[in-house]
Amino acid sequence: MNKNLINNQNISPPINLIEVEVIINRLAAIPNLIDKDIARMAFSVLISEYKDYAVGILDSEGSLIAQCRGGLPIFIANALSAGVRDGLKIYGKKNLQNGDVVISNHAGTMGQHINNVVMYTPIRTSEDDDGLVGFSAIVMHWMDVGGMVVGSFLSDDSTDIFQEGIQFHTIKLLSNGNRVEEIFRMIECNTRFPEMVMGDLESQLVGCLMGRDMVLDVVNTFTKEAVLYAVNIFWNRSEESARKIIRAIPDGTYKASTFLDDDPQLPGVPIPINVEVIVDGDEITIDLSGLANQALGPINAGYQGGAVAAARIACKYMFSPEDPANEGAFRPIKVVCPPGKLLSAGPTAAMGGSGSTIPTVVDTIIKAMVPALPDRLPAAHHGTYGLYTISGKNENNKWFQHMESSAGGWGAGPGWDGTGPFRSVAHGDTLEVPVELQEAQYPYRLDYVKLREGSGGAGQFRGGLGLEKCYLTLANCKVGVKFERTICPPWGASGGHDGQSGKVEIHYSDGRKSVTVLKGELELVKGDRAVIFSAGGGGYGDPYQRSQTQIDHDLREGYVSVQEVKEKYKKS
């Protein structure tokens, strides 16, 4: 009998269907339990509050079984699988034994910025190949891994991966249960935030070991054969659910085109995003051959972390948004993206801003499918990470940095107003860091946070609103900004208007004229203000068809102005 967790569809049922459901739900619960413990143990607010990580269980070939509900979609797509499969290729199953813990942030493997570090440990019942049940894995954003700038991934000036920090290409952090102290020292020596990074690392390590032990408890309770059988039922169920939806879509090729602002190394030259979606029976092919070529600046991603991630996020959104992420749901999806494209860049390409590209590609895939699924798909969401940082050195001459992505408006759809403000489609449920924690740790005060009036696109159904946030600096610091899709705003659908793009305004305390910035870094002094304006979502349908009751409600709540109503809705 083949004991691999993938190929066990012909074995005799070792358990009944009730036990199958118990196993599936126990396995699905494990990453969520570890998720809570990581948030409780981690040192940085980036992990404990913002939750820039994902927890998963994989089979002995690196296929995803279960992942935490709060994990970032950009990680859920295949970050854990890419890391584990590289380890299997390098070490082989026999050299990944109980007590080994492996890390990797290799750009050529993961295809994302190298702050994203995957860590995993084997789950075994014996030392031979058949004893490898799978892997407990966690991918986490480490605050800083060296490189040109504080935070490592935020520079617009980098032109290769070596300028963005240190890489660990599938190396053992623990070997046979023993800490490889040289690797711990190397990590600590290559970050500007050793206390935060090492503390987060320890929470990641404990989470991996907890996951291993909890999966083994399920295996010991039900037997390995029973777990294999249940997992395959789970995968097959998810696969059939996705295929059923795809079969209902008319066969054909669906196309859409958008663009990004520019390559930071070639300012002012838009970057084309051309996609084709081919539906053939119960399979779907996402063809990204029309993407721009690999960029000089740091907006690239590798094939696994870029093309595959974007395609899977879009398909998950369209076909199985409520189902748990797992390998079965991705089986009907094929991804085409020739080497050397923006989302299939080579291993030495600059990838600091890899994530900023992906939401627009996801939105463009969805845009292509609107004619095929007109009753289900909305206008564009704000579609950008909208990253900004406040950094510097404190009174003890130690580095500090607050990094945040913007929460903006999501697109309206056929029958509903846009929601938000939420993070991008690549972020999922990453949370706002509580203001009290920010102000206790960093030298600024958050003066106000409010909905950005008029930022949602007009339409019969209005686009979701962005935010306006004002930071008052209490000490000298730097503000870094990386906003994208400011020239190609969140588009409307079926006659709906575009949403407003994002921007950052700097208001100086010495009376100098305020400036607007979309990308780059500025020096601020005590008393200056940085005002963040996040983008809104696109509107849906002719604005003239919006009811007076809805318009009156929007006016009362401050979602739109009287002037906007006069200009776009022609109603009073």
Image (cartoon, rainbow, N blue to C red):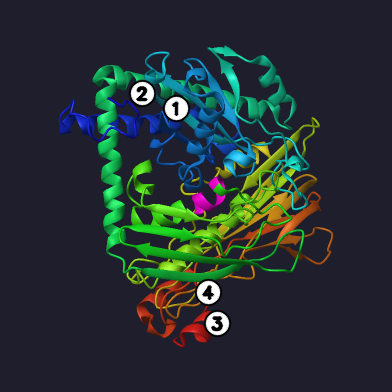
Q: Position of residue 221 (x, y in %)?
A: 26, 18
Q: Please state the extent of the stretch shown in magenta in the rendering.
A: 304-310
Gap in Å between the C-alphas at discs 3 and 4?
Answer: 17 Å
Q: Position of residue 364 (x, y in %)?
A: 50, 65
Gap in Å between the C-alphas at discs 3 and 1?
Answer: 56 Å
Q: Are marks 2 and 1 in contact (CB under 8 Å)?
A: yes
Query: Label 3: which residue?
Result: 563
Residue 41 relative to residue 113: left or right: left
Residue 136's mark? 1
Q: Quick one: label 4 or label 1, which is nearer the N terminus?
A: 1
Q: As shown in the figure, which amino acid type bears the numbered disc 4?
A: Asp
Q: Nearer the viewer, mark 4 or mark 1?
A: 1
Question: Given the current orientation, which residue lies at the most extreme front position?
Answer: 1
Residue 498's mark? 4
**Crowd class of label 1 (few under 14; some 14 to 19; many from 20; radius 10 Å):** many
As for residue 533 lying within the magenta part, the answer is no
Residue 215's mark? 2
Element under disc 2? helix
Gap in Å between the C-alphas at discs 4 and 1?
Answer: 43 Å
